[in-house]
Amino acid sequence: MLLGCCSRSLRRYFRQISCRTYSSQPEYDVIVVGGGHAGCEACCAASRMNSKTLLITHKKESIGEMSCNPSFGGIGKGHLIREIDALDGVCSRICDQSGVQYKVLNKRKGPAVWGLRAQIDRVLYKQHMQSEILDRTPNLDTIAASVEDLITVEHSPNDSNSSSNTLRRCVGVVLRDGREIRSKCVILTTGTFLRAQINIGLDVRPAGRIGDEPAIGLANTLERLNFKMGRLKTGTPPRLDGTTIDFKKCQPMHGDEVPVPFSYLNDSVWIKPEDQLPCYMTHTSPAVQELVLQNLHVNRHVSEEITGPRYCPSIESKVIRFKNRSHQVWLEPEGLSSDVIYPNGLSCTLPEELQEKLVHSIPGLENSKLVRPGYGVEYDYVDPRELIPSLETKKIEGLFFAGQINGTTGYEEAAAQGLIAGVNAAAKAQNKSPLRVDRTEGYIGVLIDDLTTHGTNEPYRMFTSRAEFRLSLRPDNADTRLTKKGHEIGCVSEHRLSLTIDMESRLGQAVETCKSFKMSVAKWSRLLPSVTFSKTPGNRSAFEMLGSPNTHEVAMKMLTAEFPEIFAWIQEDSILCRRLLIETLYARNIEQQMQDVAKVRRDEALSIPPSIDYASKQLSLSIEDREKLLAVQPQTIAAATRVPGITPSAILHLLHYVKYHAATAKIN
Amino acid sequence: MLSESVWNSGELLFVIISKNIINMTMFLKSYTHVFNHTFKKRLSNMILPSTSFSQGVTNDTIFALSSGFGKCGVAVVRVTGPRVLTISVDVAGFKQVPEPRKVFLRTFKDPETREDLDKGIFVYFKEPHSFTGEDCCELQVHGGSAVVAAVLTALSRVPGCRPAEPGEFTRRAFYAGKLDLTEVEGLGDLINAETEAQRKQALLQMGGSLNDQYSSWRASLLINLAHLEAFIDFSEEENIEDNLLSDVTTSLKNLSMSLEKHLSDGVKGERVRSGVKTVIVGAPNVGKSSLLNVLTNDETAIVSPSPGTTRDVVKTVLDIKGYPVTLCDTAGLRTDTNDTIEIEGMSRARTHAESADLILVIINSVDFVAWLESVQNINQNKLVVNYLQNYLSTLGLSDIIDCSESLFDSLEKNVSRRCLIVFNKTDLLKCKNLIRNICEKHRNFISISCKTESGFSDLVKCLEVNLKYLCGSSSKENPLLSRERHRHHLMACSNSISRFLAMSREELDSQIDIGAEHIRNAATELGKITGNISAEDVLDVVFKQFCIGK
């Protein structure tokens, strides 16, 4: 209480004293290691949960750095940002403040798969993020330091609810200067830094990012703690000087006339539509293929066995796998105040002089100057099956992982995990049960469930094809799916909650209005001659009539014109109206899907106690089933059913065990 | 109390609608709604006092033959789920909620055709006092596979009802907390054996070629799904060919046609369900109706010594050695009559013969022997063929029954229609040796006497051999059920693809996500036979076939 009123420096002073005096008492509830996209969301989420939080990062000035492409969102990724926003995350709002071009992808493929995307000004993004973290977030301290080790202690479970077979608990970190900082929970968001090395041509240097040193100590710590580790690689393209590019030879790509903001809190984005920057597209020439194939011997990154992402391949792997065709190159601006161009699709690891040659063979880039060469990164990651869905590790209580350390790729995937880890670390510190988003509730749930049950052997990226309940997990309804849930655990503000509740009730009313407004088929065809529908006699509700994507906007206008007293209030609120129309499109399909959702949720509700002994005779599992379950250690019956190759018999045994366990727990 | 009121509203609707069926789908919707709504209420009442894991009710109502397959005295079909009461109305014909745990003798009817299926026992178990904790009922019917197949088909016609997946009853029982430790442990292995072994066995028993067929459908569906997913996730920014969508549509059209052909081609399965169509033909007064009556042990058809007694086709369903048979007695065939009713009757007889799986050609042995003795020839075989050719041509059946060698050897050969030559009235013969010799030479020739009922055990044996062929070789382990399940999923798969194909170009262009959903559903259904199609499978194809490169 007292500390909360004091100034930042005073607080720090007190803390130092208390540190010396009671060094075993935790100074912080949550320590977040790493200031990338996962780290930023994690520390902000923990702070929103009113947990005393510390962010430790190598350099304060690289907080919120966009290390790779200058854009946020996209198909599937846009869904994640909307869900992060619904849980009061920060990246969505900052994107609305720092974008230079906003565009909704897939506009013609149905609102369930619309992809909100924005080209972002790197400098602005970083500025806004830093001011959010350093100035505007209460309960959050930041220091620039390098974490070398974790402090773990023998665990003595003081409450019987906690996972009883965890042996150790993480209680803080050790900095490079030897200083120890104690906390109740630690979140590692070390990105690609774990034992990272950068490859350019045959040149190999240890680095997490150009100009940043790798984290060797922490990687050793994780290995010592027996975490199952793997190695992945990724890459980034060279950066070009935009003033040396002949854009006339390229095809311009413009943003939307009416940019759609990422955040539910915003009605519009910061930039005027007409001020948006264009992107450009060009294509590779046959010379690129020739150059790549002739120089494989000087390209260490490509010749290695380590897995890179299949969907974000280097130009080398594209040329090798799909020969004799032209590949697209998108020229993306890095910001309003920068001339640097990011040639998306040209990620490569050739020696610098060959990269220059390669770039020059592309139309429009003949005379372009390389600002920085492209490079490849190899790094350690932890098998995400080491985690439970709260993103806490199974082996060390109080230790959470989020972001690329778990084998994912992409800002949005990292941010989503950061948010969940931040909330859950704070919840753990407060003895609350964790926030759990399941596959039926959001892409965040799909992401975490995929990682924690199946693991990954390539950098994991979100696609809409991964979500089985795609038609109900839409970017338009993330708030009604998640905001209440977030508020219950404490990571969502009252303000946001009230906005969501208000929208939900108005949407409910609008749906009801449309469902109860019924007319005969004859009347409908007179009112809406342009709409084609089955002429089977009977009454149709307005809700049914609006469910056709090509005509529903017109239909809504006609309805309003004809019956203003009923429909005008909906038509006047453009956001409400748009959401209503989307609901009409999917109503029928979602009704069918809800049955499957119910099945999954029922199985999700049956949690397998962490103390389960798969080898026990009582379970009588086959050796194969036992091994599969041991590898994954599913948390729920639903997760167990998704373990590849698991037999129904094993599930049945587990079901029984869960039931038996619940019964004995009750008696105790 | 609650269920009582549910009932009334349901019944009321039923009465109104059945009097005036305007829009069946609307009816079903509202009916479903009433039931869902109120059952949900009941559900919540049920859940509250029980433990956390007994939330075990899904919306589907499932059914399965729970007694063994094959000829047996009584077959028990179990049903569980919210539609049990709908079944008590639609199939068992109750007008009010049957009292739980009491046996009722009912006539079971097909809910669509209102055809009588069988007379049997109906028992209702009201939730939660049942095996699964849900509403359950048991239909105890006569054990022939024809009856069982008909009842299962009837149940699948009740909206919201489907055949149970392996182990599903047990799962539901488990969710409801109805099984104790030992029961579950015992059942676990059983269910495991049922699922994997059953799936594999079902595929194996149906022949390697069918397995290949399923695999090729799976592959085709996977590729099309992958293309649709690639179109959704990547086409905005990647080099994805413009004609992708129309290629997918073409390929799905082919797949759909192949599925539909298979579904309608599954004649053997169909025979098991609806009975092997067996038609009795012959000249007037050779004893066709008598044969029917002896086989059915009943006075199904009127018999009299005057020719032309049977005018229309008399149909009856019977069980021969466990095989379902629809036996049709037809008007005697002759050319010298002017009676318009008789002529119509004969034309119907020919039509039935044309669509029959099995034809019994009845011959008066007295006439046959007399003819044989009048013509002296050494080649008896040729004589018999001559007689039959002549006989069939007087019946006007020459073009329907190919009276060549195949008639004699059809047992070995794969002919589409099978024919048995039955010599009746052997009791009138002074010497039976001649006929007996001929019948011993040809396996599809039988001599009987309807009057003394001699020769019938040979007839039944011969019928059995032919029926076995016509119905396909049945496995020991519930072939009927596994086929029913395959058929169910294939139908659902085919329906989902049809829904995709029914989307207009405009709809596909604006809402491919919904189109993809149909194909995802199709893949899920097919996956229940062939093993599931996961998101990872789809992505593998996507990355193999497209250069996704941003």
Image (tube, rainbow, N blue to C red):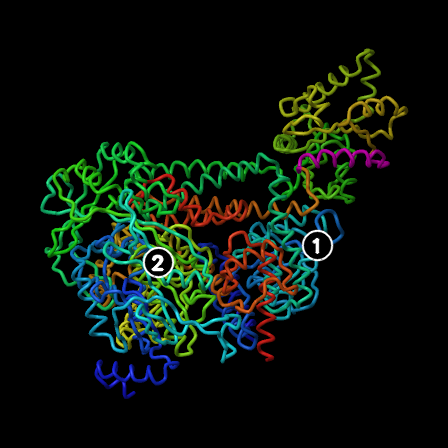
Where is residue A310? Give x, y as percent: 35, 45
| Proximity of marks 2 and 1: CB atoms separated by less than 8 Å | no
Q: Which residue is mark 2?
A: A194
Q: Quadrant of residue A423?
A: bottom left
Q: Identify the subunit bearing mark 2.
A: A
Dot 2 crowding, Cα within 10 Å, few <14, some 14–19, many 20+: many
Q: Amino acid at mark 1?
A: Ser
Q: Which quadrant of the figure contains the N terminus of chain B?
A: bottom right
The circle on residue A377 is none
Residue A582 appears in view: no
Disc 2 versus disc 1: nearer the observer: 2
Is B462 within the magenta?
Answer: yes
The answer to whether residue B500 is left or right of residue A370 is: right
In 3D space, how far apart are the residues under numbered discs 2 and 1 (Cα atoms)? Answer: 61 Å
Pointer 1: what residue?
B67
Relative to B455, is A314 above or below? below
* Magenta stretch: dominant secondary structure: helix
Assess disc 1: are there few (<14), some (14-19) or many (≥20) residues with their C-alpha within 10 Å of its C-alpha: some
In the rendered image, residue A595, in percent from the top left (x then y), is placed at 47, 60
Q: Chain of mark 1?
A: B
- Residue B434 image point, x, y percent: 86, 21
SS for tag 2?
A: loop
Pick the front one: B64 or B519: B519
Residue A158 against residue A125 in the figure, above or below: below
Magenta segment: B450-472
User: Which residue in the rendered view is the most extreme toward the bottom?
Assistant: A2
